Image (tube, helix red, strand yellow):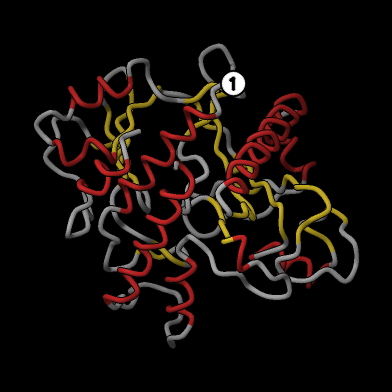
Amino acid sequence: MYRLDEIRQALPSEPLQTVEGLPYPKVATGKVRELFDAGDAWLMIASDRISAFDVILPQGIPGKGIILTQISLFWFQEVTGLVQNHLVENHDERVREMLKDRPELIMRSMLVRKLQPLPIEAVVRGYLAGSGWKDYVRTGKLFGQPLPGGMQESQKLPVPLFTPTTKAKEGHDLPLTHEEAIKLLGADRFTEVRDVSLQLFALGSAAARQHNLLLADTKFEFGTDDNGELVLIDEVLTPDSSRYWPAEHYQPGGPQPAYDKQFVRDYLDSLTWDKTPPAPNLPENVIHGTLQRYWAALEKLVQ
């Protein structure tokens, strides 16, 4: 990853909403990332788009894609002892060469191996929050896994739990029981994904605590190479894939302030919007406040 001062200087004044004009075929457009076929590898470029409730919002967050990419590159380096990742060899040099005519895209780009993605999202939860809290209120369990009675919202779990979900192309990802995930992956692969995910979560949690953050939950994605080896893909421990809380403000019993797009969700929840397209415009203070939270996460995690 680049130095913080270099990253700050590269943040644009206007959000990058789409990527056009590259000499590589665009093969996919996600909520945030755009994927290009670079021959022996995929060129993955993170835009500044932001989504909430599975709807892409009209305004982006200027520089969000740069921040997310740089956090992922930092973590890919940090976890090399646990699992291989999808970056090509000589990654930084190859990206700079490929995008020498589009330097504004370099910091938001990853050049990655062509792999076979696994059909689940590997979610690990350390605290009872979000959809996990809603499921606990409804069932007294965490997606089928037993928990003590009388727990509070945002309370720390007795141990981190692996709660996989489907990987939906549209709409919401849906929780999977361990038995359902085993049917999709096979028992050996499931065990490997679960164990590696828990190890990654432990590493991320320890690093977050050193910087006065709590890693409440996160999701990982994995693929396999031609030899069937497990590979960490997509993004890692970013504010888009994780829930980070400031440790100094932690107080179980309700929602927590967070270094992620919860700030946007809270604003949208204050409106009468029905959570279907078209989404309402974001005011300037919400855009700026969201960018501040993403930048604060970057500064804290990589300092």
Of all residues, the one furthest to the right in this rendering is 149
Locate residue 171, reporting x and y percent. 50, 59
Q: Which of the two residues, 79 or 116, is positioned nearer the viewer here?
A: 79
Could you say whether the residue bearing mark 1 is in a helix, strand or loop?
loop
Return the residue at label 1: 81
Q: Is residue 281 above or below residue 47?
A: below
For label 1, the crowd category at 10 Å Cα-Cα, with few meaning under 14, some 14 to 19 and many 20 or more, is few
Q: Quadrant of the N terminus?
A: top left
Of all residues, the one furthest to the left in this rendering is 101
Kindly identify the residue that appears in the image at 81 percent across and 48 percent down. 159
Residue 182 lies in what quarter of the image? top right
Locate residue 25, reporting x and y percent. 21, 32
Number of residue marks: 1
Q: Is residue 260 above or below residue 153?
A: above
Q: Which of the two residues, 240 or 23, is positioned nearer the viewer here?
A: 240
Q: Which of the two residues, 233 or 254, is positioned nearer the viewer here?
A: 254
Q: Quadrant of the C terminus?
A: top left
Locate residue 286, reporting x and y percent. 35, 74
Kindly identify the residue that appears in the image at 30 percent across and 68 percent down. 288
Residue 42 lies in what quarter of the image? top left
Q: Amino acid at mark 1?
A: Gly
Of all residues, the one furthest to the bottom in this rendering is 272
Image-based side of 107 in relation to 298, left or right: left
Kindly identify the residue that appears in the image at 85 percent across and 66 percent down. 140
Image-based side of 26 in relation to 226, left or right: left
Kindly identify the residue that appears in the image at 61 percent across and 52 percent down. 215
Locate residue 197, reporting x and y percent. 66, 36
Q: Is residue 40 above or below residue 21?
A: above
Of all residues, the one furthest to the top in this rendering is 227
